[in-house]
């Protein structure tokens, strides 16, 4: 195991939106692979035809691209271990399932849905309200453990639908060392005879994951904690098929918790925060679930907040870039208990990243926000200087539009309520004269604008402070934005004059 090249995999089922817990699994895989000079693989687990959703696979790769977590091997970039979609590996699994039958660790089961239902009803007791297909019931069912070899072959010949089930041994202690949870032990008697191969010839997750992790030479497998209870089945399958000379080391990652237990997409809808990486529209119901991307998160912030949702580096540091994460990530600092997702904290990360990144790096995503609102940006350096000017006031990317749209278009509304109560004839006169002075100004430059403004205020005996707020509202539409003379300089002389006179008409109406 030690001399094997590190190979890790993210193995999503293309069934819908990519939950932030899923992206965190990708991230931990990615960080570990990069840190260990290993290979990061994406394998599409699409064997459950009933849960397959068209478009979901493309969407997963789109999300990974946005996050900057691109795999080294995947269906889009095959390496030497393909195919990377389980549906394309179908014939392979049957061979392994038959091998398990031959070694008597699995058996054919011919029970119909009605017969299974009947079993659940017949064996229901107070202590056991939901009986399973296991050591208590298996010998009372229609399977190759009960039927003669000849009868079994006859049913197969007749194309009777069957599944292949693992035969869980009795009272065996199954232990392994999880990289997050440490030593974990199970009793095989408590686990049911899981289906390995379905009637349609497709493997279930349990068989496929073991076979593929083996064939793809996976050394470490990170997956959600919900899979911990399946570990005994996987360990036995591995032992029966490949021996226990080596096995991937598992890390079962803690759940991400919402306000009430496991964070769900319903929590997102209820509390108004995203749960998926990017917008996902269910093709059947057309229901849209919002994504972090569309909400206005930077990928740097999204990655950072996910990294620390269940891991820390042992210090107080909270902001990490990808390279720092690659250097510092360690599985022994992954928490064992669930990590609570806090949207306010998530926004804080985005705000910090907006402050941290230079305007040139914010340009592309911010430009997109403006383009969506119909404002086409031509001059990048000028745009960068505006981005720099307002970025400390922005938490989510759409805030750039709210905070800076007035640099590109005349406000549509003016906050009259902020001005009118203190509006006087003198102030009104001041601004009319200011228009004239500004008109005459030879150099439209911030200090010169400030100068004539202040001189005129002194001449009129009005405190400049009382005039700045109305001036700001005239130029911006509201009581916000950076230094007002800077705004005037940036929007230019004709536009400043135009806004002052339009606003005067409104204030005087
Ligand atoms: N297909 C499983 C899932 O979607 C993968 C679990 C694993 O990584 O083994 O959760």
Image (tube, grey):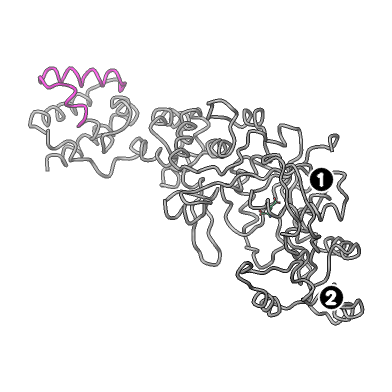
| Left or right for 316, reference 127 | left
**Mark 1 residue's CB less than 8 Å from ligand 1:** no
Residue drawn 67% across the image and 69% down it: 131
Magenta stretch: includes residue 228: no
Residue identifier under label 1: 247
Specify the segment rendered in magenta: 444-470
Query: Residue 94, image x and y in percent?
Result: 84, 64
Q: Foreground: 327 or 99? A: 99
- In the picture as drawn, the residue positioned furthest to the left comes out as 425
Residue identifier under label 2: 146
Q: From what the image shows, is residue 499 above or below residue 278? A: above
Secondary structure mainly formed by the magenta segment? helix
Query: Residue 481, image x and y in percent?
Result: 32, 31
Q: Quadrant of the N terminus?
A: top right
Residue drawn 33% across the image and 28% down it: 482
Query: Residue 229, image x and y in percent?
Result: 68, 54
In space, the residues marked 1 and 2 are separated at their CA atoms by: 33 Å
Which of the two labelled residues, at mark 1 and mark 2, occupies the earlier sequence position? 2
Magenta stretch: includes residue 456: yes
Q: Secondary structure at mark 1?
A: loop
The image quarter containing residue 91 is bottom right
Query: Residue 32, image x and y in percent?
Result: 70, 36
Q: Secondary structure at mark 2?
A: loop
Q: From what the image shows, is residue 290 above or below residue 315? A: below
| Left or right for 401, reference 220 | left
Closer to the eye: label 1 or 2: 2
Asked whether residue 121 appears in the rendered view, the answer is yes
Q: Which mark is residue 475?
A: none
């Amino acid at each position: 195991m030690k001399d094997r090249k590190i190979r890790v995999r993210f193995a999503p089922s293309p069934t819908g939106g990519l939950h932030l817990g899923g992206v965190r699994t990708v991230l931990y895989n990615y960080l570990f692979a990069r840190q260990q000079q290993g290979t990061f693989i994406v394998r599409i687990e699409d064997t459950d035809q009933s849960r397959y959703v068209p478009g979901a696979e493309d969407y997963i790769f789109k999300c990974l691209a946005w996050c900057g977590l691109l795999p080294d091997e995947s269906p889009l970039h095959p390496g030497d271990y393909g195919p990377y979609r389980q549906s394309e590996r179908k014939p392979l699994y049957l061979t392994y399932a038959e091998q398990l039958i031959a070694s008597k660790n699995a058996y054919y089961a011919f029970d119909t849905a009605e017969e299974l239902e009947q079993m659940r009803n017949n064996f229901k007791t107070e202590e056991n309200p939901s009986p399973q297909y296991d050591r208590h019931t298996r010998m009372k069912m229609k399977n190759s453990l009960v039927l003669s070899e000849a009868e079994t072959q006859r049913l197969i010949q007749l194309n009777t639908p069957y599944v292949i089930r693992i035969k869980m041994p009795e009272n065996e202690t199954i232990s392994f060392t999880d990289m997050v949870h440490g030593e974990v032990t199970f009793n095989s008697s408590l686990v049911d005879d899981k289906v390995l191969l379905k009637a349609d010839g497709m493997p279930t997750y349990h068989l496929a994951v073991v076979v593929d992790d083996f064939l793809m030479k996976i050394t470490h497998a990170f997956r959600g904690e919900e899979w911990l209870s399946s570990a005994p089945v996987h360990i036995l399958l591995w032992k029966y098929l490949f021996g226990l000379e080596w096995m991937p080391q598992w890390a079962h990652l803690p759940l991400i918790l919402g306000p009430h237990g496991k964070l769900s997409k319903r929590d997102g809808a209820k509390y108004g925060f995203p749960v998926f990486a990017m917008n996902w529209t269910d093709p059947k119901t057309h229901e849209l679930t919002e994504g972090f991307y569309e909400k206005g998160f930077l990928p740097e912030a999204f990655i950072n907040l996910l990294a620390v949702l269940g891991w820390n580096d042992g210090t107080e540091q909270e902001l990490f870039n990808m390279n720092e994460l690659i250097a510092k990530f360690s599985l022994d600092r992954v928490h064992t208990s669930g990590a609570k997702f806090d949207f306010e904290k998530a926004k804080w990360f985005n705000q910090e990243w907006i402050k941290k990144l230079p305007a040139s790096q914010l340009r592309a995503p911010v430009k997109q926000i403006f383009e969506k609102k119909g404002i086409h940006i031509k001059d990048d350096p000028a745009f960068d200087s505006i981005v720099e000017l307002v970025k400390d006031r922005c938490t989510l990317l759409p805030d750039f539009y709210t905070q800076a749209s007035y640099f590109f278009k005349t406000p549509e509304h003016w906050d009259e309520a902020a001005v009118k109560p203190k509006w006087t004839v003198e102030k009104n006169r001041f601004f009319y004269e200011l228009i004239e002075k500004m008109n005459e100004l030879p150099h439209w430059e911030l200090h010169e604008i400030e100068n004539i403004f202040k001189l005129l205020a002194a001449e009129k005996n009005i405190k400049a402070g009382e005039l700045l707020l109305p001036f700001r509202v005239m130029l911006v539409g509201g009581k916000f934005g950076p230094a007002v003379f800077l705004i005037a300089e940036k929007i230019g002389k004709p536009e400043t004059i135009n806004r002052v006179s339009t606003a005067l008409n409104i204030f005087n109406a």
